[in-house]
Amino acid sequence: MGAAQEGLIVKEQSGFYWVEAADGNTYMCELRGKLKEAAQSSDIAAIGDRVSITTRRDEGTGVLTGVVMALSPRKSVLSRAMRTTGKRGAGQAEREQVIIANADRALFVVAAAQPPPDLELLDRLLVAGEKSRISELYIVVNKIDLAGAASIQDQFAPYERMGYRVLRSSALRGDGIDGLRSILDEGISVFTGPSGVGKTSLLNRIQPGLGRQVKSVGRVSEEGVHTTRDSALIRLDSGGYLADTPGIRSINVWDIEPDELDAYFVDIQPYVLDCKFGNCTHSKEPDCGVRRAVRAGKVEGWRYRHYLELCDELRETYIIYNR
């Protein structure tokens, strides 16, 4: 074995981790025994993790391999809850699936039209983003060539008032591509959003062939306890890294209890202290500061509905898993 060195996990497949090491080489690594045991119950290692490895070169084949000996603390982690047993885990316990560790920014992509923007899914992604501690969260509205500017403004101006940066783009016409390219030129970025919003076309605009390159490593299977996820960080020509995720239809937020959810809706959180009761659920209690804000137009009614729906879902999950 060679000397220990630091590295970055850039690919994960079937329990193996490809690590870009300080010496400039990439090593196919396994987790050391104790880490492998811990990985049975949680995603202890994922793309974006900084690790310490020991390395070796196979004398016969020249293949570079190694062992992950330790992982550095994560500065951010974007996760979702995954069911773990049975047919798609119906009714069974959940575990954390780490989408990416240590991302510097997340870009949540929606379409202005075809398909129409799914704002409920976007709000769930934003909650996961707020929970993740990722410092930069963006909303990318693609296909702006298919919708009127006034319609786009009406739908997404509320997010801008909340403090989110909304980027408008058209993969077809090239609108907004230079701005996206400049955002991605350093650090680690993650693209995610539902199918059909044009992520692949956007990536190909940002860098020719990038969408195809990312798609080739983006296979996910969510069936059963042994979740297979092939994911990778792609090094961009500009120097940054990009992780794309497959199109998602829903996201179950991880490790948020119902009474904590209001802290992750950035437009609702400022009015929580105006509630008469400290344990206010913002649904039916008298003298609720959040509901007053909704009536006054300070919180959008649809955002409030999305909050209540997600809170009910978390409450049901919390009851099932804490009986």
Image (cartoon, rainbow, N blue to C red):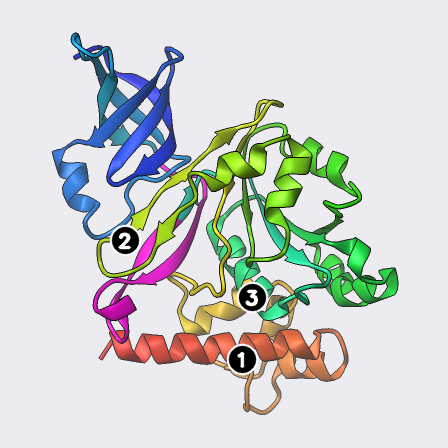
Q: Amino acid at mark 3?
A: Leu
Residue highlighted by disc 3: 121
- The mark that comes first in sequence, 1 or 3, is 3
Q: Quadrant of the C terminus?
A: bottom left
Residue highlighted by disc 2: 227
User: Percent from the top left, x then y, of residue 209?
Assistant: 59, 32
User: Percent from the top left, x then y, of residue 95?
Assistant: 29, 59
What span is in magenta? Answer: 73-98
Residue highlighted by disc 1: 308
Q: Quadrant of residue 26?
A: top left
Is residue 213 found left or right of 110 in the rendered image?
left
Question: Dot 1 lies on which element?
Answer: helix
- Total tally of numbered discs in the picture: 3
- The mark that comes first in sequence, 2 or 3, is 3
User: Percent from the top left, x then y, of residue 153?
Assistant: 82, 62
Q: Is residue 20 above or below residue 168?
A: above
Question: Dot 2 lies on which element?
Answer: loop
Residue located 27% across and 25% down the image: 28
User: Are there few (<14), some (14-19), or many (20+) residues within 10 Å of tag 2?
Assistant: some
